[in-house]
Each structure stands twice: as structure tokens, then as C-alpha cells.
Image: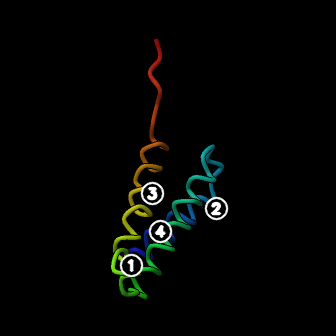
Amino acid sequence: MAVAQLLIWAIFAGVTRHPSRWKLWLVVVAGGLAMLLEIYDFPPYQGFVDAHATTIPLTFGGVLLEMMLNFEPLTC
């Protein structure tokens, strides 16, 4: 499912002329990096950070960017 989601985002970013196209590519790259970290699942580094903990900011950042893409400012 993650691969399908990344492919859909990449195709959408490549085909459309969306004003925030670079944010879409950032979501695709961060999602791919998060997927690779989950696949390799390295042990905790010095007992603090493991692969699962490093993917949280990557995937949460993607959600924030998705929210920013759909943001419409209020007009007075």
C-alpha cells in the first residue's frame, strides 16, 4: 500500500502543474525514505533511536504538507 501511495503521489506531482509541486515531491521522497528505514529496521543507535522512531517525523511531516496543500486562507 505504501508503494502504491508513493506512486500515486509521484505521478500526480509529475503530471500536474500544481503550484506546490515541490512539496508533493518532498512528500514522495520523505515517504520513500521512511519506507526504506522500515524495511532495513536497524537496531537502536546507542540505545536511543531505532528505525521506527526515525520514521515518525518523516511520515508526520508528510501529513503536515498534505494539510498545507489543501489550506485555503480566509478572506475578509
Q: Residue at x 39, y 81 (%)?
A: 46
The image's colouring method is rainbow
Question: Element under label 2?
Answer: helix
Q: Nearer the viewer, residue 59 or 12?
A: 59
Reading the chain from its start, which is encountered first: label 4 or label 2? 2
User: What residue is pinned by disc 4?
Assistant: 31
Q: Please tell me whether residue 13 is drawn above or below residue 19 in the rendered image.
A: below
Q: Residue at x 45, y 50 (%)?
A: 66
Amino acid at pointer 2: Gly
Q: Which mark is residue 62?
A: 3
User: What residue is pinned by disc 1?
Assistant: 51
Give the image quarter of residue 15: bottom right
Q: Please tell me whether residue 67 is drawn above or below residue 5 in the rendered image.
A: above
Q: Please tell me whether residue 17 is drawn above or below residue 58 in the rendered image.
A: above
* Label 3 Cα neighbours within 10 Å, binned few <14 / some 14-19 / many ≥20: many
Question: Element under label 4?
Answer: helix
Question: Element under label 1?
Answer: helix
Mark pair 4, 2: CA separation: 16 Å
Mark pair 4, 3: CA separation: 7 Å
Contact check, label 4 and label 3, Cβ < 8 Å: yes
Q: Residue at x 64, y 61 (%)?
A: 14
Q: Which mark is residue 76?
A: none
Amino acid at pointer 1: Ala
User: What residue is pinned by disc 2?
Assistant: 14
